[in-house]
Amino acid sequence: MKTNRSQAALIIAASLLTVAGCDKINSFFGKNEPQEMVQRVEPKKDETVGMLLPDFAQLVDKEGQTVVNIQATPNSAAKRGSSEEGMDLSQLPDGDPFSEFFKRLVPNMPDMPQEEEDGSGLNFGSGFIISPDGYILTNTHVVSGMGNIKVLLNDKREYSAKLIGSDRQSDVALLKIDAQDLPVVKIGNPKDLKPGEWVAAIGAPFGFDNSVTAGIVSAKGRSLPNENYTPFIQTDVAINPGNSGGPLFNLKGQVVGINSQIYSRSGGFMGISFAIPIDVAMNVANQLRTTGKVQRGQLGVIIQEVSYDLAQSFGLDKASGALIAKIIPNSPAAAAGLQVGDIVRSVNGEEVRASSDLPVMVGAIAPGKEVNLEVWRKGEKINVKVKLGSMGEQTESNTASEPEAKPQQPGSEGFTPQGSGLTLRPQTDGDGKTHLIVIGVSGAAERAGLKRGDEVLAVNNLNVASEADFRSALSNAGKKVPLLVQRGEDTLFMALNLQ
């Protein structure tokens, strides 16, 4: 035992000597403190050390009373099985995930009456109060085709609602209930929203009223198919059937949008939802309240996005604006002298960042008003004043099908300008007009997206109808050339890069 104790004492003494020796060595080399393996970086004074998650409890407590639940009974003419989105579920194929989704969830929905044998049932959604005397905003698809519309307030009061008007283009509807001194929402400015900002939705998903979900703004100004006049706010806030028509709040408790649509392959929420900006909705609501209808200004043009390659081919420093691919005959655009190939850069001084901005900006201006457009034309900025028309006033007068094209030289293999990757064949139609038809693509033409059967209408904004026209226009166009192409009934520009 004594021997073991002596050995232990020696080991401890050696350990202390080792530590002391290391300290002396460090002191010798000017290192008085042990060094860390990873260097510690202290945050600067102007850097955020930490971020706290938002507390939505106060928002819900103050603003929840402005949100309403909407229940509506379809008219007798409404189709059996129509859902909140206006879709006839009976027409969906067997095994369709959207159909199966609703077959599972709708029958078990709390406090929601079962469909009667004649197919009648309740359509459900959300809304919010915008005036103390009972005006309420919701989605058109929530109340479309509905006869008996009921509004349930947060304090459990129920009212029958009158449909003042609805607008299918924006999916905004205005209701009115006979009530006074109601709590109203605060209207925010969607233009102040930033991607990454926290937002919250209050509504009645699947009939669960006063449900709160939260998330962030994913993007702004989203353009959806067949929705040319609404720059949607994209979020990851959980939105499900029943949330439609409800408000989207910012952290200040202000409404910045109306929850309207989701992107889904299953019928349920998959992380992408869309809201109508509240400024767009209020514009519609004010028109519905005063005139009972919505009017939008119109230029009478068909536009396309300005890609990076197209921007370079037109001599622009950045890819922005709306490229005019077609002018509707007898339209305000035609009367003002706008041309195919013009790129609209701003409307009344407000920048057109993407082509989808132009219909929204013009549509927000009343018909008959004059607007000032900044246009990029043939390498120069010019200003064009246009007196706007109204939607529906202009119709295309050139929709009649053209006579079938006939080869100008039967059996001709066409011509291939060097470096273009295009093989073109002149053809004449029954009226004797000549057309340049693409019969082969490779290299630069293939990379540009040209296809067999396309008709080349213009090269570098110069109309072409023959081999001589094409070669002359191409030789004077430089290395990046905009081509105007007819494809079926559509006209579009493509950038041919000859480098």
Image (cartoon, rainbow, N blue to C red):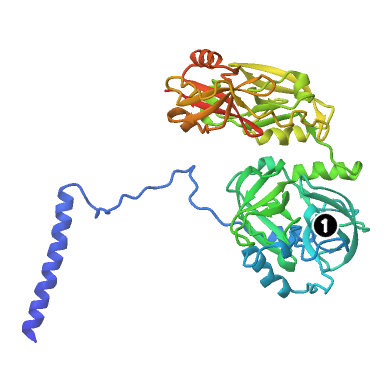
The structure residue drawn at horizontal position 78% and vertical position 72%, both measured from the top left corner, is 112
Which quadrant of the view contains residue 377? top right
Seen from the viewer's position, the closer of residues 275 and 44 is: 275
Q: 470 above or below 228?
A: above
At 75% from the left and 66% from the top, the residue drawn is 209
Which one is nearer the viewer's eye here, 55 or 388?
A: 388
In the rendered view, does 80 fall on the left or right side of 484? right
Note whether 349 is above or below 36 in the view shown: above
Q: Residues within 10 Å of mark 1 (few under 14, many from 20)?
A: many
Q: Write down the quadrant of residue 148 in the picture.
A: bottom right
Q: Name the residue under label 1.
A: 143
- Give coordinates of residue 207: x percent, y percent: 75, 68
Is residue 296 visible to us here? Answer: yes
**Furthest-bottom residue in this view:** 1
64 left or right of 161 in image: left
Q: Where is residue 397 in the image (x, y as percent from the top left)?
A: 78, 28
Q: Eyeballing the image, is 268 above or below 447?
A: below
Judged from the image, the secondary structure of the residue bearing numbered disc 1 is helix
- In the picture, the quarter occupied by the N terminus is bottom left
The percent position of residue 37, horizontal first and vertical second, equals 27, 54
Q: In which quarter of the image is the C terminus?
A: top left
View extreme (right): residue:
178
Type of amino acid at the residue the image marks with label 1:
Val
Q: Count the marks: how many?
A: 1
Residue 139 visible in rendering: no
Q: Which residue lies furthest to the left in this view?
A: 3
Q: Position of residue 339 (x, y in %)?
A: 68, 20
